Image: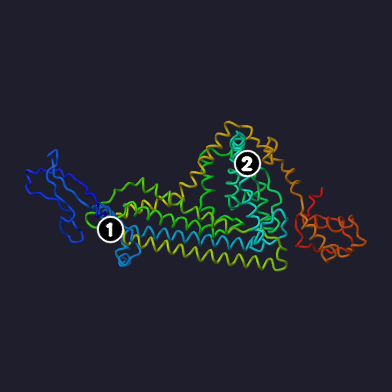
Amino acid sequence: RVEDLEEPIVLELPIDLGATPGASCAYLDENAGRWLTDGVETRGATEAGGGLACATTHLTLFSLIIRAFEQQLLCANLAVFSLEGFTAFDANLLRRPATWVLLALVCGCLAAVVGALQADAQARNEFWKDSCFVYDVPHHLQTPLGLSFCIETMRAVGRAPRRCRAVLGQCCTAQPARKFVAGIPFGVAAVGVHAQLSIRYRLDISAVGRHVWTSNGWVQGDLARCCSRGLAERLALAHDGVPKAFHRFFHGMGFPKKLWVLFVAMHPLQQIRHFDPLMTCAKRSKLVVDALLGGLVLSSVFMSAMGSALSIASPSECQNSGSDWARFVLIGMGSTLLVKLPLVAVDYAHRRAFVHHQMWGSRTEKIVLLRWTVMDRIFWFVGWLFTACCCAYLAAFLAKLHPSDDNTWIVLLASVVLRFITVGPLMIALPIALAATVLQWRLPDFASHGDKRLGFVLDSASEARAAPKVQELANRGITVEDLLRLYASLGSKEVMPHFDPERSTTSDVVRQAVIPLTCGSLQCDHPRTPREDDAQPSNIPRQFALGEVE
């Protein structure tokens, strides 16, 4: 309120003095609840004679603004955590469709986390544990930790201005644009191949690029293959399938098939069950759940702040702003993007990294596993606390929400969910599928034969199927492990019991061990020495077979 003005302000009220004789000026005192004339002077008719002139030394305009804002607060569903909100929890809440939709969403989120936990348990039993990260890591691949991390961070901050100047200098030329355009075919091909291998071998799409093949060629010196034999076998299968996947992506799929494969490979519900050494499936699923519920909470707050959600205690004069569903859809999708920004930082903060086995001496593995265990417990404690807070807010919001706005809130929830399960993957898959179709038309040589920079070049001879005899001869190979097992079996009762490493020659081993074992597996007759045993070992792999004896 503005009062005690030295020079009064003259106001002209457009009224007919002839029809209202004896009119005077006054103001409404809200505290007293009546009209008063203190500080107000009636000066009679105006000079033009069309109204009444009033002089006042105080203004009450600000009280009108506060009154309008107070009315907005009374109508909006903002006071969620209040005594009135908690008293709204009753049996009628379970009869509302919005409540059951929220319960279905929460149950679906819990099912996704449980499925991810099962996938992690299977991976630990088959081929990967956290202890695999403690390895003999080369110096150039070591991740800085502790004090080294702080030093590297300070160095990176010091180099930032110089790098910014270099980037700005390059942006002034056409070289970055040409480099970007030239790399589009390689990037599109890499995403298409990664998507196929991710679906077929149940690997995270980013893990395929880190451990198998990228647009720059084959991945060299991958530590994950060295640490786990089971994972190495799976990555080897993916490695062998890269050329075939490249050819299938450009020539074995139409546009709908390309779009579907990319959509499925990038779908969050599909990716949370695929293996990634750097982060468990359970953590990735928990981040998806937090982004989903957090986006729904933020959307509900925006809905209330914009006056689109009335409270059950709203006065009768409150009017809803209308059910503009397009606006609600945009609010839901925008909220998920805002929530996902901090979760990306959490994702990178909780990723695993390879640690040199002598970083802290003989206690390296124990220290690393203890640190990761503490970080995991903090992650799950804070994560479940965040989930509980989101569920509590949504339940309280629905309890105070006016029943007439249930359908509006369901539309808001549907927009948030569709942003994750449909719109997000589709917005990534659609441009890549279109680019692949255009590349197949504009660059037929690249789509048919590849490029040397990819690490392979396809030709008609490589696509032709080899003759059965050629395939048979190509498969007659043995591994180092098979050779070691054969050497360990020499001198036993089953295989060449008279073997002497000082006197036996290679020819003796071939004639008296390898050939008898081969013919024994093929059930053919062969000459034996008097000291050989007729029993054939059952634990010798069939890879030692040299072929049919003709």
Q: Is residue 105 above or below residue 21?
A: below
Give the amino acid type for the residue marked by disc 1 in the picture.
Leu
Residue at mark 1:
74
* Distance from the alpha carbon under mark 1 to that under mark 2: 56 Å
Left or right: 367 in relation to 301: right
Quadrant of the rendering where the N terminus is positioned: bottom left
Residue 526, given in percent of the width and then of the height, sits at 85, 55
Residue at position x 46%, y 59% in the image: 109
Instruction: Tell which circle, 1 or 2, labels the residue nearer the N-terminal end.
Output: 1
Residue at position x 92%, y 62% in the image: 502
Residue 473, given in percent of the width and then of the height, sits at 76, 46
**Residue 447 visible somewhere in the drawing:** no
Q: Tell me which corner region of the image, top left, top right, bottom left or bottom right, holds residue 544.
A: bottom right
Instruction: Work out which residue is located at the far right of the displayed protein and give it.
Output: 503
Element under disc 1: helix
Residue at mark 2:
166
Camera-side residue of 7 and 444: 7
Give the amino acid type for the residue marked by disc 2 in the picture.
Ala
Element under disc 2: helix
Callout 1–callout 2 Cβ contact below 8 Å: no
Residue 151, given in percent of the width and then of the height, sits at 65, 57
Looking at the rendered structure, which numbered label has been put on residue 316?
A: none
Q: Is residue 13 above or below residue 500?
A: above
Instruction: Work out which residue is located at the far front of the displayed protein and give it.
Output: 6
Marks counted in the figure total 2
Left or right: 347 in relation to 413: right
Residue 207, given in percent of the width and then of the height, sits at 61, 52
Left or right: 507 in relation to 127: right
Mark 1: give few (<14), some (14-19) or many (20+) Cα within 10 Å.
some
Mark 2: give few (<14), some (14-19) or many (20+) Cα within 10 Å.
few
